């Protein structure tokens, strides 16, 4: 198990709306961050993205399940994210499984790519479109 990945996961899991200044301890100034919904370039834009994210969701937590280093400076984290949003599923706590691909140098991540089902995270829980997406998923399965 990679010490860097463990330390990163612990630092990332400790983030909240009150300590986002700690992003600079985890990420390089030229961080390239992407997930199925957003792409962000640079530490300042990443900070803005997380500020907006933490302002909109409640009870956001990450539970990291696996740490897989594939080579020096590159690895994967598998996680479960729990969160609630007042406009999704009447504010109840939701959970999404995902994986992060990380590349790092000098003990800071410079590339972070998240993989997760955006439908399971967001679209399935919207009042009107959610029923359509759940129906489509059942039909395609």
Image (cartoon, rainbow, N blue to C red):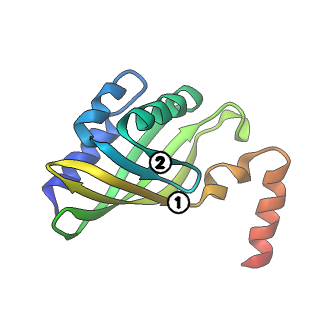
Please provide percent x and percent y for residue 71: 19, 71
Residue at image mark 2: 81
Checking the image for residue 116, the label placed there is 1
- In the image, residue 52 above or below residue 63: above
Is residue 1 in view from this perspective?
yes
Is residue 59 in view from this perspective?
no
On the picture, is 134 further left or further right than 81? right
Q: Nearer the viewer, residue 93 or 29?
A: 29
Residue plotted at (15% across, 67% down): 72
- In the image, residue 73 above or below residue 17: below
Task: Residue lying at the far bottom in this picture: please name it.
Answer: 141
Checking the image for residue 37, the label placed there is none
Q: Secondary structure at mark 2?
A: strand
Q: Disc 2 and disc 1: Cα gap in Å?
A: 10 Å
Please provide percent x and percent y for residue 114: 45, 57
- In the image, residue 56 above or below residue 1: above
């Amino acid at each position: 198990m990679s010490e860097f990945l463990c330390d990163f996961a612990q630092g990332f899991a400790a983030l909240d709306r009150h300590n986002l200044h700690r992003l600079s301890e985890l990420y390089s100034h030229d961080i390239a961050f992407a997930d199925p919904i957003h792409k962000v370039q640079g530490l300042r834009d990443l900070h803005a993205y997380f500020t907006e994210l933490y302002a909109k969701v409640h009870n956001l937590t990450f539970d990291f399940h696996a740490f897989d280093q594939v080579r020096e400076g590159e690895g994967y984290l598998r996680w479960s994210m729990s969160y609630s949003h007042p406009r999704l599923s009447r504010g109840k706590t939701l959970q999404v499984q995902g994986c992060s691909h990380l590349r790092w140098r000098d003990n800071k991540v410079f590339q972070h790519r998240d993989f997760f089902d955006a439908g399971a995270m967001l679209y399935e829980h919207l009042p009107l479109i959610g029923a359509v997406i759940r129906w489509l998923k059942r039909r395609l399965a």
